[in-house]
Image (cartoon, helix red, strand yellow):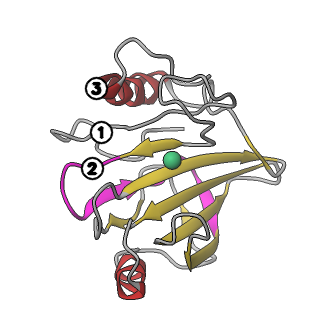
C-alpha cells in the first residue's frame, strides 16, 4: 500500500495508529490509522489498485456524527475502507462530504487515484483508514511500501514521538 495522502502537507498529523490492545500511546483499541489534515478539503488517494464496492453515508451510533464510508475491494481477501469522519452532527455536512468524493461504486482505482477530499465540517474531522482481511480489521503494518510506512509513521510521531505504527 502507498500513503493515502500527500502526507508531507504542512501541519497534517495523525492522532492514532492501529492498536489491537488498549495500552497503545493513543490509549484506545483502534482498528485503523487516522489522518488529520491541516486544512479543509485535503485530497486522499487510493493506496492500492482496487474496485469501489460500497459508498455509504450514515450517522455514527456512538459519536452521533455523520460520516461516509468507502470500501475498495483489492481482491477476495483484502478490502480497504476509508472513513471520512466529518465530526458534524448535521446531515447536510454528511451530504457535503458525499459530494466531495470523486468515485462511484464499480469504479476501478489505480494506486494514487483520487478518492475525494475530506470535508472538515467539525473540529477533529479526519480520515480513518482500515484494512480488512477476510472480514477482520487487520494490523496494516507490513502492507505499506517502505516509503509509505515511513511517511505514515512520521505523521504519527508528530503526536506520539518514538511510538510504533501498530500495537
Ligand atoms: Zn480512527
> Secondary structure beneath disc 1?
loop
Q: Is residue 40 left or right of residue 89?
A: left
Dot 1 surroundings within 10 Å: few (below 14), some, or many (20 or more)? many
Which residue does the image show at 35% across and 81% down from the upper left? 93
Q: Is residue 154 left or right of residue 76?
A: left
Task: Tell me where the magenta segment starts and ends, as one range.
Answer: 36-52
What crowding class fits label 2: few (fewer than 14 Cα within 10 Å), some (14-19), or many (20 or more)? many
Quote the CA–CA distance across marks 1 and 2: 9 Å
Question: Looking at the rendered structure, which numbered label has been put on residue 7?
Answer: 1
Pointer 1 residue Cβ closer than 8 Å to ligand 1: no
| Label drawn at residue 123 | none
The picture places residue 112, in percent across and down from the top left corner, at 42, 51
Query: Residue shown at 28%/26% (left/top)?
Result: 158
Q: Position of residue 23 (x, y in %)?
A: 60, 22
Of the image marks 1 and 2, the number of the one nearer the N terminus: 1
Residue underneath mark 3: 158
**Residue matched to label 2:** 37
Whether residue 47 is visible to the viewer of this picture, yes or no, is no
Report if residue 43 is visible in the image: yes
User: Is ligand 1 within 8 Å of the beta carbon of the residue shown at mark 2?
Assistant: no
Q: Is residue 34 left or right of residue 55?
A: left
Question: Does the residue at mark 1 contact the one at mark 2 (Cβ under 8 Å)?
Answer: no
Q: Is residue 96 above or below residue 83?
A: below
Amino acid at each position: 500500500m502507498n500513503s493515502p495522502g500527500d502526507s508531507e502537507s504542512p501541519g497534517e498529523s495523525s492522532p492514532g495508529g492501529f492498536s489491537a490492545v488498549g495500552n497503545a500511546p493513543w490509549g484506545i483499541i483502534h482498528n485503523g490509522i487516522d489522518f488529520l489534515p491541516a486544512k479543509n478539503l485535503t485530497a486522499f488517494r487510493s493506496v492500492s489498485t482496487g474496485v469501489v464496492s460500497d459508498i455509504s453515508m450514515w450517522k455514527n451510533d456512538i459519536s452521533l456524527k455523520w460520516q461516509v464510508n468507502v470500501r475498495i475491494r483489492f481482491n477476495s481477501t483484502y478490502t480497504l475502507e476509508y472513513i471520512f469522519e466529518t465530526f458534524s452532527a448535521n446531515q447536510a455536512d454528511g451530504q457535503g462530504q458525499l459530494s466531495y468524493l470523486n468515485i462511484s461504486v464499480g469504479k476501478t482505482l489505480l494506486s494514487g487515484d483520487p478518492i475525494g477530499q475530506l470535508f472538515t465540517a467539525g473540529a477533529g474531522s479526519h480520515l480513518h483508514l482500515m484494512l480488512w482481511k477476510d472480514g477482520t480489521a487487520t494490523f496494516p503494518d507490513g502492507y505499506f511500501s517502505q516509503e509509505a510506512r515511513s511517511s505514515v509513521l512520521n505523521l504519527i510521531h508528530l503526536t506520539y514521538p518514538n511510538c510504533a505504527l501498530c500495537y
